[in-house]
Amino acid sequence: MWYELAFTPDDNDTWFVTAPEFPEVATFGATQEEACRNGLNAIEEAIAARIANGDDIPFPLKDTPGKGRFVEVPGMVFLKSGLHMILKGKGWTRADLMRALNCKREHVDRLFRIDHNSRLDSLEDAFKALGHPLRFDMDFPQAA
């Protein structure tokens, strides 16, 4: 899943980077490649902050429209963002999810921490508990 970046040449031979969907994102890079990496890191930090504050997260693009610069968020960041938004949309708290999963609070909190490498089966259980079983939409090549 993708988010757009906007690049502006800075007056010191660097690139100033913002993200239209995240007004709080502002970073730079000496090269466009470095600017993309820094932009992605800044988006991940913005998502982590929004989860911590209980704020909405803009839904990423499924595909890039072909023009512009885009970065792809890691799958785990996408899953944790989705879990946060579904929990919020359902009107549940983390305590509600903890009760539904019959687990400790720390386990649930880790499901929402971007810096924690949660197990996929734990995320699957959380999505199921929220009534949104985890699905993947991908094409597999036919076996030879």
Image (tube, rainbow, N blue to C red):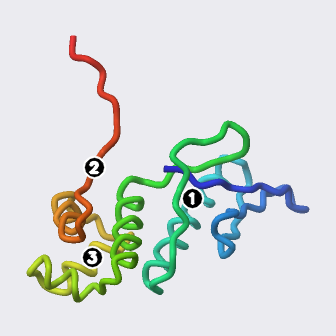
Q: Name the residue under label 2.
A: 135
Quadrant hosting residue 11: bottom right
Q: In the displayed structure, would residue 97 be above or below residue 26?
A: below
Residue located farthest toward the left when viewing the structure as drawn = 102
C-alpha span from label 1 to label 2: 25 Å
Looking at the picture, tell me which residue is in the foreground, 101 or 19.
101
> Residue 73 at x, y = what percent?
48, 54
Q: In this view, does 7 lie above or below 50?
A: above
Would residue 86 appear left or right of 1 to someone viewing this image? left
Could you tell me the amino acid type at mark 1? Leu
First in residue order: circle 3 vs circle 2: 3
Q: Name the residue under label 1.
A: 40
Residue at image position (68%, 46%) is: 69
> Who comes first in sequence, dot 1 or dot 2?
1
**Where is residue 88 drawn, in percent x and y?**
39, 79
**x and y percent of residue 1 in the render?**
48, 50
Tell whether label 1 touches label 3 (CB within 8 Å).
Answer: no
Three-letter amino acid code at the position of disc 2:
Arg
Residue shown at the point (72%, 49%) measured from the top left: 31
Residue shown at 21% from the left, 69% from the top: 126
Query: Which quarter of the rendered picture does the C terminus lie within?
Result: top left
**Identity, as a three-letter code, of the amino acid under mark 3:** Arg
Of the two numbered discs 3 and 1 on the same chain, state the one appearing first in sequence.
1
* Helix, strand or loop under label 2: loop
The residue identified by callout 3 is 110
Q: Is residue 63 left or right of residue 5?
A: left
